[in-house]
Image: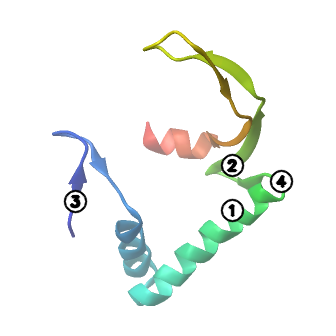
Amino acid sequence: MRKQYLCARIYIMNKGDLINAVAESAGITKAQAGSAVDAVFSGIEASLKAGDKAAFVGFGTFSTAHKPAREGRNPSTGKTIAIAAKTSVKFKAGKSFVDAVN
């Protein structure tokens, strides 16, 4: 397994690593695990696109937040610029997940 490190101590798990972990844990092929991981991600994405939340007891809740359009400043020139409205994704970790990490 190839590991990516942000710095000397922080390992970054990517989608391929997750697929390998699911395949090994569930005793299925990597292709089946890849399909399962893609299905989970697609389900969460569809829920958020519809304006709903995706809540997983013990793990956490994915939700969206609307950020209205606003004015900002270009730090180089000091000119006022228009920043477009957007929808951002939020994640709140569940208590069991937080306790497991700590």
* Disc 4 + disc 1, Cβ < 8 Å: no
Q: Which residue is mark 3?
A: 3
- For residue 23, say whether it is visible: yes
Q: Position of residue 7 (x, y in %)?
A: 20, 39
Name the secondary structure under disc 4. loop
Identified by mark 2, the residue type is Phe
Residue under the image location 83 percent in, 59 percent down = 50
Identified by mark 3, the residue type is Lys
* Disc 2 + disc 1, Cβ < 8 Å: yes
Q: Position of residue 26 (x, y in %)?
A: 46, 81
The answer to which of marks 2 and 3 sits earlier in the sequence is 3
Identified by mark 4, the residue type is Asp
Please give the label number shown on residue 44. Answer: 1
Q: Quadrant of the N terminus?
A: bottom left
Name the secondary structure under disc 3. loop
Q: Mark 2 and mark 4: span between their CA atoms?
A: 9 Å
Query: Dot 2 surroundings within 10 Å: few (below 14), some, or many (20 or more)?
Result: some
Q: Mark 2 and mark 3: span between their CA atoms?
A: 27 Å
Residue 4 is left or right of residue 12, and the answer is: left
Name the secondary structure under disc 1. helix
Residue under the image location 75 percent in, 37 percent down = 65
Q: Which residue is mark 2?
A: 62
The answer to which of marks 3 and 1 sits earlier in the sequence is 3
Is residue 23 depicted above or below 4 in this figure?
Answer: below
Q: Position of residue 54 (x, y in %)?
A: 74, 55
